[in-house]
Amino acid sequence: MSIAVDVQYATDAPDLPCEADFARWVETVLKARKIDGEICIRIVDEEESQALNAEYRGKDKPTNVLSFPFEVPPGVPVTLLGDLIICAAVVAREAEEQQKAALHHWAHMVVHGTLHLLGFDHINDDEAEEMEALERDLLARLDIADPYAI
């Protein structure tokens, strides 16, 4: 299996996961789905997250994770799956608000975003249930509790 993860740190936020953490989280998803691929993860500040969220989703506020799947032209043998943009400040704030271990919330955002790159979504209830079940299973493989448990 060939899996590559490129991590770009575009913020000096404290307590960020290391590249090995990001690679482990992505690999957990791709190996479970038996998919080869390459993903770029860019860790950003709120300003960059807000600008991208406004431009691509029409929402003028920072968000935890944005997924940009790469559309491979027919017949081109490319394994690039796409890019994840993760806002460090939003993830840290959410982890604190939800009383979750920060590293666990980071893992959830990477798993969630990677599933988006693979075509999963949560627009309707059925899709959301399927995606959340996958997230629970994948996070359990990492010894992380159900992120949706209240």
Image (spheres, rainbow, N blue to C red):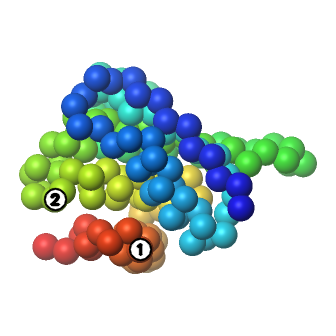
The disc labelled 1 sits on which kind of residue? Arg
Residue 30 percent coordinates (x, y): 59, 62
Q: Residue at x 27, y 58 (%)?
A: 104
* Residue 140 versus residue 41 in the image, above or below: below
Left or right, 147 with respect to 129, comes to: left
Viewer-nearest residue: 88 or 21: 21
Quadrant for the N terminus, please. Answer: bottom right
* Residue 101 versus residue 11 in the image, above or below: below
* Picture quadrant where residue 127 is located: bottom left
Residue 120 percent coordinates (x, y): 52, 63
Q: Secondary structure at mark 2?
A: loop
Q: Residue at x 19, y 42 (%)?
A: 92
* Residue 122 versus residue 49 in the image, above or below: below
First of labels 1, 2 by sequence position: 2
Left or right, 17 with respect to 6, comes to: left
Q: Which mark is residue 100?
A: 2
Residue 101 percent coordinates (x, y): 18, 56
Q: Of tags 1 and 2, which is closer to the observer?
A: 1
Quadrant for the C terminus, please. Answer: bottom left
Q: Residue at x 47, y 30 (%)?
A: 8
Please give the residue where the numbered disc 1 appears in the rendered image: 141
